[in-house]
Amino acid sequence: MNIDRIEFIAWMERIMERLDILKDHINASQKQRSSIDGEELLDNQDLLQMLKVSSRSLQRYRSTGKLPYYTISGKLYYKLSDVHQFIRESFNTPLARIKDKS
């Protein structure tokens, strides 16, 4: 079966359009799944990469109550706003300790 160049390009454009539609659909459904009340949720892997800490450190932050978390279907999630607050508090704490020791 031989097709000419113009017909081939037309087929490729239609395929690419459909792939773009699928990509948009997948992205939209992933955003819906990983958010609660309009706020983005992060899982353990996201947080390990973001904070560059070990899984044990993450567990310690949860156990001490420094980092709020939510369990959904047995999987741990963190609200992005809670993570930002945790980071802010983590940066402020060492400075306060240094000033107290002086």
Image (cartoon, rainbow, N blue to C red):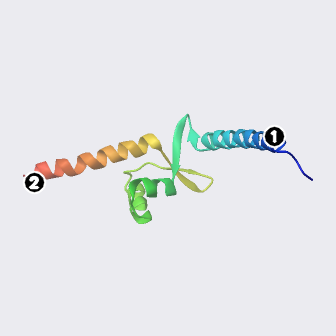
Residue 60: image tag:
none
Residue at left 58%, top 55%?
A: 75
Of 32 and 7, the residue lying toward us: 7
Circle 2 packing at 10 Å, graded few (<14), some (14-19), many (20+), is few
Residue at left 39%, top 54%?
A: 51
Locate residue 24: give its quadrant.
top right
- Count of labels shown? 2
Q: Which label lies toward us, 2 or 1? A: 1
Residue 31 is situated, as x and y percent measured from the top left of the image, at: 60, 41
SS at circle 1: helix
Of 84 and 8, the residue lying toward us: 8
**Left or right of 64 in this view: 12:** right
Of 27 and 48, the residue lying toward us: 27
Residue furthest to the top in view is 38
Q: Looking at numbered disc 1 in the image, what kind of residue is underneath it?
A: Ile
Q: CA distance from mark 2 to mark 1?
A: 76 Å
**Left or right of 101 in this view: 86:** right
Residue 88 is situated, as x and y percent measured from the top left of the image, at: 31, 44
Circle 1 packing at 10 Å, graded few (<14), some (14-19), many (20+), is few
Residue 101: image tag:
2
Residue 73 is situated, as x and y percent measured from the top left of the image, at: 63, 53
Label 2 vs 1, first from the N-terminus: 1
Of 90 and 9, the residue lying toward us: 9
SS at circle 2: helix
Locate residue 89: give its quadrant.
top left
Q: Looking at numbered disc 2 in the image, what kind of residue is underneath it?
A: Lys
Locate residue 26: give its quadrant.
top right
Residue at left 43%, top 40%?
A: 81
Residue 9 is situated, as x and y percent measured from the top left of the image, at: 78, 42
- Seen in the picture, residue 32 relative to 97 is either above or below; the reply is above
For mark 1, what is the residue? Answer: 6
